[in-house]
Every structure is written in structure tokens, then in C-alpha cells.
Image (spheres, rainbow, N blue to C red):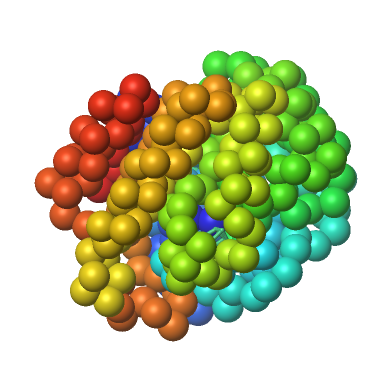
Amino acid sequence: MVDLSNSEAQQLGLRFVGFYFMNQKEIEHISNNNNSSLLTTSNHDRDIAGLKYVYPVLSRRAGGLSVGINFNTNNACNWRCVYCQVPDLIKGAAPDLDLPLLEEELRGFLNDVQQGDFYQRFQVETDNRVIKDIAISGNGEPTSVKNFAQIIDLIGNVATENGVLPKSRFVLITNGSLIHQQKVRKGLKALHSYGGEVWFKFDSTTKEGRVLINEATQSVKSSLENIRISSELCTTKLQTCLFDYAGQGWPVKEKLAYLEALKIISATTEVKEILLYTLARPSMQPEASQLAAILPDVLNAVAEEIRQLGFKVSVAY
Ligand code: SF4
């Protein structure tokens, strides 16, 4: 899931989780020479720390370190967004997780950052030596994992014991399609108990658009219901990616439907904030060559229209 992309919207430090792809030689070099590796804002390689579930991302806009957690080590998602940055993406759910290993990796990583020489090893600039968030953002839909609530508790407990929470943000980046499931609701309650928040993907509010952009068959109505459920259980923000697909820009029909949906969301849910962003890194899907970022002026104009509906809007270019 792109961290949104990785996301940053300024004051939130929305961090767009993306990837920096290295060839095999570079990866081997890093594996063999950790002491000389650089963690930079352009290096989002999820293998850089050599761990299975935990990966560091340095966020320029957030001004610090994001601790990413990837449940979808099989690159499986129930959607297939045309802009998805996951290589070799397949349809499916997250595999069973090795919970003792996840706990060991997270404890070890946080200890390395807080008490070890992580920042020195990866030559992180002094100003960026702070954990800004723990982000559940994987190579697929994280809520598809079994024991979702148990895993949220595991991460929340470890991060609390290490003093990372509640100081840092705890974010779940999700396409929101499974939030009606009991196991996910339970997990969102747990996330809320740690002061966490949900970033709910909401790109299109037309049936055709959702199929075209996300390859999602879930209806807009069901998605709106999941937004309502999510916002009642945990602080929920919507993340919307606007981009040019096949030279069409953002179609007027899509825009009108989106703004109408926001009016419904404003009236029926607790959602107060929208995270707008555009493409920042290459898609790994076959449609990649047909996609382009939306111009900042266009994003800003859309943001203003959304603000007129009463939402707070953050924009990441
Ligand atoms: S929802 Fe799935 S397909 Fe879409 S960007 Fe996220 S991981 Fe990729």
C-alpha cells in the first residue's frame, strides 16, 4: 500500500511509503555492508534493515523516521490499484504471521534506534533522528491478516514499552474494504486504545472508477458504511490519490461524485480530514506508462473545494 504512499501532508507528516528499487547487486552490497548503508529520504527500500516485517523509512516532510510494518510479505492484496508500487503484486490475503519473530524484530529494531547505533550506521542526519510514527503499511492490504487485533496489540504493547507510543503516531494504512469484519473492528478498537489512526483509501466514488483505478468490486455504499464504522471506532482520515490516467486528468464525473460522497461522509461520519496526494513514485503495474502526477495547482484547487465542505485537507505533491 503506497504510504502513501507515503505520505506526508505537512503538519501530519504524511509519509508516502514508497519504494526505492535497487538491483540485486546493490541489495547484496547493503546486506553485506550495513555499516556503510545510507538511509535517505529517497531510499525507501523495505529490505534495507534486513528484517522480514519491520522496515525503516526516512521521511523528509515528516522530519524523521517512520517505522514501517509489512504484514503482506507475499505481495498479496485484495485490490489492484493501477498506481500500486508493489512489484509482483498478486490477488490474495496476508499470510499467517510469525508473531514471535515480529515481536523480536520490532523490539530489536526499536532498541537499535533508541539505544544502539542505528542512526550512525545508516548515516541519518541529526535533525532526522526521531521516530515520527509506526505505520502499518505493507505490500498488500494489512487488515486481511488473521489475528489482526492480536497483532495490533502486540505492536502497540511493544511500542508503548519502548516509550515510542504515545509520543509518536500509530497509523494503519488500509483500503478499508474489510473494516466491516469483526476481527478488523476489534483491531480498530485496539488501535484506538493506543491513540492510533486509520488512513482509509478513498480514490473513486463511482462504480466504474473503482473498478478502473482500484480493481475493486465493493460498492460505494459499502465503502461509505465502512468509513462510518471506522470513524466510530478510531480516528479516521481519508487518503485520496488524484492522478492523470491515459491523458484524461481527473474526470469531471469523478470529481462531482467524489464531492457528493464527501457531503454524505460529512453528515454521517466522524471523518474530519482528507489527505490528498498524487503520484510520487513509479507504479509497478502494467498501466504505469499511462499514469502521470496531477499538477500542484490542480491539487490545491481541489483541496480548496473540499475545505469548503468543512474538512481539513492536507496535500502532498
Ligand atoms: S490497496 Fe493494495 S493494490 Fe492498492 S495500493 Fe494498496 S497494496 Fe497496492
Task: Tell which quarter ligand 1 is in.
Answer: bottom right
Relative horizontal placement of residue 89, taking residue 240 as reference (left or right): right
Q: Residue furthest left?
A: 297
Quarter of the image where one finds residue 244: bottom left
Could you say where residue 286 lies in the image, as x and y percent from the top left? 44, 83
- Residue 258 appears at what percent x and percent y? 38, 47
User: At which x and y percent is residue 140?
Assistant: 63, 60
* 284 lies left or right of 225: left
Q: In the figure, is residue 208 to the left or right of 235?
A: left
Asked whether 136 or 313 is in front, the reply is: 313
Tally of marks? 0
Report whether residue 17 is seen: no
Horizontal and vertical percent for residue 54?
64, 48
Give the residue displayed 58% in from the left and 42% down from the top. 224
Quarter of the figure that contains the N terminus: bottom right
The part of the image, by quadrant, that contains residue 125 is top left
Q: Closest to the observer: 64 or 265?
A: 265
Q: Can residue 91 be seen by looking at this rendering? A: yes
Where is 213 relative to 239, above or below?
A: below
| Front residue of this view, candidates 243 and 255 | 255
Q: Residue at x 44, y 64 (%)?
A: 209
